[in-house]
Image (spheres, rainbow, N blue to C red):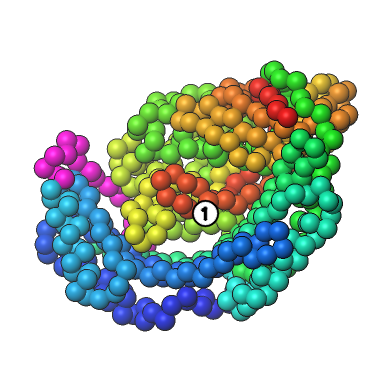
């Protein structure tokens, strides 16, 4: 079911488009070689519940226009958060002056890869608009989750339940004739629990989210999810601490998705590639096992990073970054695509109208293989099973260190005892090259906000896999 999109504002769309068109004409007359103007209106709700009380709540609305002009091979950018011709004219003039000034100092002139101008209007599927659910009802739901978690055990010492929804309308137009309207609705709920017994602390975390309406909350049932998270945190209090070292490891969908996005995906973003990453000058070379295919996609529909068009008006398409172990390509903006002689991929994204677009991931995952997940464990003589990522760090050389929520020793194909406080580290390419089993259980459904200079919604995942990874542990 697709409801008529309900804008967060009261904007006259025709007026905005006429204003943008007038702005584009004005910028070209001033001498700009290319101009794009983005309008955005959005409304978001954020609620945090902790220890039986609403700790924070906010209802935010933004509305504004971003202008980017290309003059003599240099960009200029300006934005405004009040809508009028006078302010838009001033923003265009400011962006133009900035571009002209920087062009005198710029050695390499910016040029853009060609894209056929699109005219389109798209909207995400919504069954229940978040605005149709009162703030009081949303708070009541979160308080019920919180209460259920705290009543699960007296060893639960802290919990944090967060709800967020956003409804956004974006209108993009440029001097080449593109005219695109994208309407999105996103909902997300995260649950974090900390259990403690004596000096042992055990954290657990789960998140649900998607480019959907409030039906996501009814479908996923955060109360049941809260019990699951609480149980995991308490159960792990009596788990062992692992021995360190290089081990054969079976990774679940979540841990794999974390590595694919954080440790590998960023190194394939073309702006970073041009600055130097582990994947620079590696097109056509082997960077993973023959079993590995990695894709960044504008879909599937409903994924948290759903992006039918990017913030340069480029229609989204699948980017096969790795195919059967071989590096095939990078994620691009129009600018990086021209530099590298590639096609734009629909990966130019901006946090809001107030930010210029950067090359960013959308929904990044490893394609499934033929193994059943249980068979991967059963065919592992000795190793470790890793479930659920809970943060960490990585760099553009592919080096990473992540914390794992839950782990089990594997012996002769069986899970013999649980482990806690597990960390994994290594180099993304070395880990991907070591993969010798890929499951058939692809899951995309690990929503988050990626923070490469700006915050944008992303998703990802993959199947279960088996590889070699360096395992560490802490109390």
Q: Residue at x 46, y 34 (%)?
A: 267
Name which residue lies at 68% across and 75% down. 137
Quarter of the figure that contains the N terminus: bottom right
Q: Is residue 416 above or below residue 337?
A: above
Which x, y percent locates residue 324? 59, 31
Residue 467 relative to residue 269: left or right: right
Q: Residue at x 44, y 44 (%)?
A: 452
Number of numbered callouts drawn: 1
- Residue behind mark 1: 457
Q: Quadrant of residue 377?
A: top right
Magenta highlight: main SS: loop
Q: Position of residue 62 (x, y in %)?
A: 41, 69
Answer above or below: position of 185 versus 305: below
Quadrant of the image containing the C terminus: top right
Q: Is residue 99 visible?
A: yes
Observer-nearest of 223 and 273 = 223
Q: Vertical placement of 175 versus 250: above or below?
A: below
- Examine the structure image and report whether residue 123 is included in the region drawn in magenta: yes
> Picture quarter containing residue 88?
bottom left
Instruction: Return the x and y of residue 191 as percentages of the image width and height.
Output: 69, 54
Residue 273 location (% of width, % of height): 39, 33
Asked whether, in this view, residue 462 is left or right of residue 250, the answer is left
* 466 is higher (above) or lower (below) than 2: above
Q: Taking the image as drawn, is residue 327 in sight?
A: no
Is 412 left, or right, of 285 in this rendering? right
Q: Which residues are magenta?
A: 102-124
Does residue 231 belong to the magenta stretch?
A: no
């Amino acid at each position: 079911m697709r409801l008529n999109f309900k804008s967060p504002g009261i904007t006259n769309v025709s007026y905005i488009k006429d204003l943008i068109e007038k702005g584009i004409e004005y910028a070209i007359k001033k001498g700009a070689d290319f101009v794009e103007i983005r309008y955005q209106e959005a409304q978001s709700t954020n609620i945090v519940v902790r220890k039986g009380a609403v700790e924070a709540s906010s209802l935010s609305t933004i509305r504004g226009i971003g202008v980017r002009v290309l003059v003599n091979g240099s960009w200029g950018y300006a934005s405004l958060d009040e809508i009028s011709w006078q302010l838009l004219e001033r923003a265009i003039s400011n962006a133009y002056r900035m571009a002209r000034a920087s062009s005198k100092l710029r050695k390499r002139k910016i040029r853009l890869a060609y894209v056929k101008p699109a005219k389109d209007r798209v909207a995400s599927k919504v069954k229940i608009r978040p605005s149709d659910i009162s703030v009081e009802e949303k708070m009541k739901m979160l308080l019920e989750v919180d209460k259920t978690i705290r009543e699960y055990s007296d060893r639960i010492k802290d919990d944090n339940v967060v709800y967020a929804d956003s409804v956004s309308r974006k209108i993009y137009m440029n001097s080449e004739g593109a005219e695109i309207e994208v309407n999105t609705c996103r909902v997300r709920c995260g649950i974090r629990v900390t259990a403690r017994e004596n000096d042992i602390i055990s954290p657990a975390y789960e998140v649900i989210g998607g480019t959907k309406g409030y039906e996501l909350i009814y479908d996923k049932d955060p109360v049941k999810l809260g019990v699951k998270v609480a149980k995991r945190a308490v159960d792990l209090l009596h788990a062992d601490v692992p021995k360190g070292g290089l081990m054969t490891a079976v990774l679940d969908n979540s841990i794999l998705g974390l590595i694919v996005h954080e440790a590998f995906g960023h190194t394939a973003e073309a702006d970073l590639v041009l600055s130097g990453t582990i994947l620079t000058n590696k097109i056509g070379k082997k960077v993973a096992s023959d079993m590995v295919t990695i894709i960044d996609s504008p879909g599937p529909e409903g994924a948290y990073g759903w992006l039918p068009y990017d913030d340069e008006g480029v229609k989204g398409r699948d980017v096969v970054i790795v195919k059967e172990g071989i590096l095939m390509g990078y994620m691009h903006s129009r600018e990086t695509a021209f530099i590298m002689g590639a096609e734009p991929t629909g990966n130019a994204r901006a946090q809001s109208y107030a930010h210029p677009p950067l090359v960013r991931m959308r929904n990044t995952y490893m394609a499934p293989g033929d193994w059943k997940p249980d068979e991967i464990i059963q065919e592992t003589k000795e190793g470790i099973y890793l479930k659920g990522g809970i943060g960490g760090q990585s760099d553009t050389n592919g080096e990473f260190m992540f914390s794992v929520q839950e782990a089990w020793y594997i012996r002769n194909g069986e899970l013999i005892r649980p482990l806690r406080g597990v960390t994994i580290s290594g180099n993304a390419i070395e880990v991907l090259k070591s993969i010798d089993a890929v499951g058939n259980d692809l899951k995309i459904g690990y929503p988050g906000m990626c923070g490469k200079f700006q915050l944008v919604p992303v998703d990802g995942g993959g199947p279960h896999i088996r590889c070699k990874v360096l395992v560490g542990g802490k109390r």
